[in-house]
Image: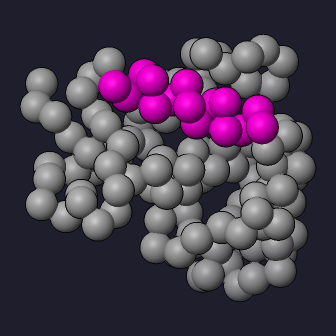
Amino acid sequence: MDEKYITFKLLVCRSIAALRRSRNIHQRDVAKVIGIAQASYSRREMGRSHYSIVNLMSITKLFEIDVPHFFLMVQAIEKELKKINVYIEDEDKIKDKKQLGFEQLDNLIGVFLMTRDINTTHPT
């Protein structure tokens, strides 16, 4: 398999989107919790805008997972991605490299979430 790349920001954003969907929570509900419009929240999930630490704390609380556990989950997803030659790269260096598509990334994160109990165990 050819090497493909994503940014860490995109991995975090799409992981949040996958967690939200796995808990049957709507974008508008998360947007309301963090005090922004649904359209602004959608841009965050797509990786077009950043989450603040305060936003991330509110979101993980809504998802009933703490921030450190969330980042352990993201780290475990990154480890799984490396097994299939998908690597994290800086945003300014990724432009000229082959990137993993959203749908593929979402599918991989979804499989990860379905195969692990992220609520009660270490995600690796």
Compare residues 106 and 68 and report the one nearer the observer.
68
Q: Residue at 67% of width from left, 30% of height from top?
A: 72
Please tell me how many numbered marks the rendered image carries. 0
Q: Which color scheme does this rendered protein use?
A: one colour
- Residue 45 vertical placement versus 70 (above, below): below
- Per the rendered image, the range of residues in magenta is 68-82
- Residue 118 vertical placement versus 104 (above, below): above
Q: Residue at 36% of width from left, 43% of height from top?
A: 88
Q: Residue at 16% of width from left, 34% of height from top?
A: 3
Res 92 quadrant in image: bottom left
- Residue 22 vertical placement versus 33 (above, below): above
Tell me where residue 42 appears, x and y as whole percent: 57, 72
**Residue 30 shows in the view:** no
Q: Is residue 98 left or right of residue 79?
A: left
Tell me where residue 78 appears, x and y as whole percent: 46, 31
- The quadrant in which the N terminus is found is top left
Give yes or no for residue 72 being in the magenta stretch: yes
**Residue 10 shows in the view:** yes
The kind of secondary structure the magenta stretch mainly shows is: helix
Q: Residue at 46% of width from left, 50% of height from top?
A: 8
Tell me where residue 69 appears, x and y as whole percent: 76, 33
- Residue 110 vertical placement versus 10 (above, below): above
- The quadrant in which the C terminus is found is top right
Q: In this view, does 25 lie to the left or right of 120?
A: left
Tell me where residue 46 appears, x and y as whole percent: 47, 65
